[in-house]
């Protein structure tokens, strides 16, 4: 079966399942953990550096796992990776609901962060990238829209549960959401690639067959790592990830320090997520027509502007303005990264390439929150940290602007 003119293309079921597990994966997000920072710190007496350390440790270990899980996705498909990662998150959240000491928090949250960065993030976007060609941008955008929607919904839900019950009940809610919306659909619907089901990739002409279409031409991994563009993009994504993650864990504490109430500060997290959801869909569609490189550069520059906005934000208007810009930065970069890799090097080794790329991003995610925590614990203010993050974002924009698509790769999407 090569085309399905009167039936739903199966790739949309894959995209829907990947979007669902990204929705539930809000449980692992720093933007959700920031809601837990104050109640858990007050109960146990932890400082910000101690809490941030768990996010960084999990990110580093997840980064180490990402290249291997990317290769597994190329070879066996994303279903096992997604289901396994989702189950780890379920068990980790249940354990967090019973945490009594910092060591237990480290074990559990490190595990869920490893599952997030080393498994779920790799499997979700790559699984969709292998099913779509012409509409790859909007399909990948749908995946990250699910992640942003999860933040929109779950941040106020978590705050509501904490306010009316306690923070332990909120972790249980996150576990149940992951099981029902993430694990079960992924187990039922995710498949490796259309060829395994006798289908042709979406967007291919009828004449294109396995091994004969333009999309099947790709640069071998050993040649990919020899191209200058690969390393420049990696460094740029690393620096951009430092800028993105350096705020997330500390946003609610910073805004409350600036005089906003906790519910208002948490609402800024939801505004950021709404902005990210819009960005995921808009960027996904635009990436089918506009250079992913150009949009990445603009996203990093927008991130630098957002940092300057946040430094002195002490009103709802300023906080929400920052949240809108930061939402476009975070989700925009995550959406564009796999699209850019597929455009430069093809889809057959997309999992391996994106696994290495994600490792670089995750190392950035590890550095950002820890660096901001150290600055705060040393100075009592986040100002120095946010100024530094803005400068890092500018450098990332300059680096990404210098990349060029390798001449050996087919031009399937706009450069």
Image (spheres, helix red, strand yellow):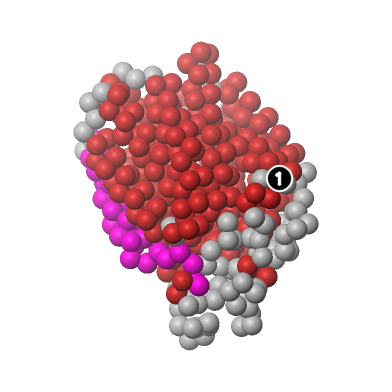
Q: Residue at x 56, y 34 (%)?
A: 364
Residue 151 shows in the view? no
Determine the residue located farthest toward the top in the rendered image: 378
Label 1 belongs to which residue? 226
Viewer-proximal residue, 359 or 116?
A: 359
Q: Who is closer to the viewer here, 410 or 11?
A: 410
Image-quadrant location for residue 236: top right
- Residue 59: x and y, percent? 46, 35
Image: 373 above or below 267: above
Give the magenta part as a residue range. Answer: 166-195
**Overall secondary structure of the magenta stretch?**
helix
Above or below for 210 versus 284? below
How many numbered circles does the render carry? 1
Visible residue check, residue 412: yes
The spot of residue 377 in percent (x, y) is 47, 16
Of residues 125 and 249, the one drawn nearer to the viewer in this rendering = 125
Q: Where residue 67 sits in the image (x, y, percent)?
A: 51, 44
Question: What's the residue at 53%, 40% (across, down)?
Answer: 359
- Magenta stretch: residue 171 in it? yes
Give the side of residue 189 with respect to residue 70, left or right.
left
The residue positioned 50% from the left and 19% from the top of the image is: 374
Give the answer, above or below, for where 5 lies relative to 224.
below
Residue occupying the far bottom of the picture: 6
Give the image location of residue 213, x and y in percent: 65, 73
Q: Quadrant of the C terminus?
A: bottom right
Could you tell me which residue is drawn at 48 percent across and 78 percent down? 198
In the figure, is residue 157 to the left or right of 247?
A: left
- Which secondary structure, mark 1? loop
> Is 42 part of what is drawn in magenta?
no
Q: Quadrant of residue 51?
A: top left
């Amino acid at each position: 079966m090569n085309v399905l003119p009167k039936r739903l293309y199966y790739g949309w079921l894959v995209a829907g399942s990947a979007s669902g597990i990204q929705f539930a994966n809000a449980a692992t997000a720093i933007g959700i953990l920031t809601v837990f920072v104050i109640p858990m710190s007050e109960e146990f007496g932890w400082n910000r550096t101690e809490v941030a350390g768990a996010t960084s440790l999990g990110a580093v270990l997840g980064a180490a796992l990402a290249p291997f899980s990317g290769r597994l996705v190329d070879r066996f498909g994303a279903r096992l990776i997604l289901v396994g990662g989702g189950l780890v998150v379920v068990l980790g959240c249940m354990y967090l609901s019973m945490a009594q000491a910092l060591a237990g928090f480290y074990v559990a949250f490190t595990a869920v962060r490893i599952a997030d960065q080393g498994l779920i993030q790799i499997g979700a976007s790559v699984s969709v990238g292998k099913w779509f060609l012409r509409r790859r941008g909007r399909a990948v955008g749908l995946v990250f829209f699910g992640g942003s929607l999860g933040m929109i919904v779950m941040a106020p839900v978590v705050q509501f549960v904490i306010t009316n019950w306690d923070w332990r009940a909120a972790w249980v809610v996150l576990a149940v959401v992951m099981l029902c919306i993430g694990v079960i659909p992924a187990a039922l619907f995710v498949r490796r690639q259309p060829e395994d089901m006798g289908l042709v990739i979406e967007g291919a002409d009828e004449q294109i067959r396995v091994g004969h279409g333009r999309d099947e031409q790709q640069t071998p991994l050993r040649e990919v790592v020899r191209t200058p563009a690969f390393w420049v993009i990696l460094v740029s994504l690393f620096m951009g990830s430092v800028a993105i993650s350096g705020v997330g864990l500390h946003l609610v504490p910073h805004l409350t320090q600036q005089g906003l109430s906790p519910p208002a500060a948490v609402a800024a997290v939801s505004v950021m997520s709404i902005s990210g959801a819009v960005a995921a869909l808009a960027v996904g569609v635009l990436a089918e027509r506009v250079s992913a490189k150009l949009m990445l550069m603009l996203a990093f520059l927008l991130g630098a502007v957002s940092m300057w906005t946040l430094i002195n934000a002490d009103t709802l208007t300023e906080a929400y303005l920052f949240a809108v810009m930061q939402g476009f930065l975070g989700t925009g970069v995550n959406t564009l990264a796999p699209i850019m890799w597929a455009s430069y090097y093809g889809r057959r080794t997309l999992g391996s390439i994106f696994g290495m790329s994600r490792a670089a991003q995750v190392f950035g995610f590890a550095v950002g929150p820890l660096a901001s925590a150290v600055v705060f614990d040393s100075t009592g203010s986040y100002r120095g940290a946010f100024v530094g993050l803005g400068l890092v974002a500018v450098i990332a924009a300059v680096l990404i602007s210098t990349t060029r698509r390798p001449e050996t790769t087919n031009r399937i999407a706009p450069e």
